Amino acid sequence: MVQSSYKDVYDNILSDSQLIRGMANNDPRALAEWNKKMSGGEPVAPEYKETLERMEKGIMPFNSDSGQETSGDIP
């Protein structure tokens, strides 16, 4: 696997309009995708793996206002 520079990774993310829209709307799926791109293929820490899997399913780990899990389908 070819190691990308951070600039290449950022450029890739910024060129993905769907990912940018999802991140702007706090879509947990987009945030999980951003995490994957930023990690450059490095393994996820065990304590974060379950959280990332839930985000990939559209479940935000917590709502900062209530401390409750929320769906990514926020109006």
Image (cartoon, rainbow, N blue to C red):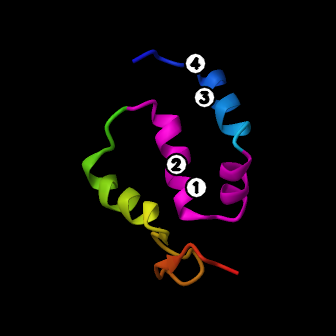
Residue type, numbered disc 3: Val
Q: Quadrant of the C terminus?
A: bottom right
x and y percentages locating residue 18 in the rendered image: 69, 52
According to the picture, the residue beneath numbered tag 3 turns out to be 9
According to the picture, the residue beneath numbered tag 1 turns out to be 30
Secondary element at tag 1 = helix
- Per the rendered image, the range of residues in magenta is 17-41
Secondary element at tag 3 = helix
x and y percentages locating residue 3 in the rendered image: 47, 17
The front one of 57 and 25 is 57
Q: Nearer the viewer, mark 2 or mark 4?
A: 2
Q: Is residue 18 above or below residue 60?
A: above
Q: Quadrant of the N terminus?
A: top left
Residue pictured at 53% horizontal, 60% vertical: 29
The quarter of the picture where residue 44 lies is top left
Q: Are discs 1 and 2 less than 8 Å apart at CB?
A: yes
Residue type, numbered disc 1: Ala
Residue pictured at 36% horizontal, 32% vertical: 42
Residue pictured at 56% horizontal, 45% vertical: 34
x and y percentages locating residue 40 in the rendered image: 45, 30
Residue type, numbered disc 4: Ser
Q: Nearer the viewer, mark 1 or mark 4?
A: 1
Lower sequence index among marks 1 and 4: 4
Marks 4/3: CA–CA distance: 6 Å
Marks 3/2: CA–CA distance: 12 Å
Marks 1/3: CA–CA distance: 15 Å
Lower sequence index among marks 1 and 3: 3
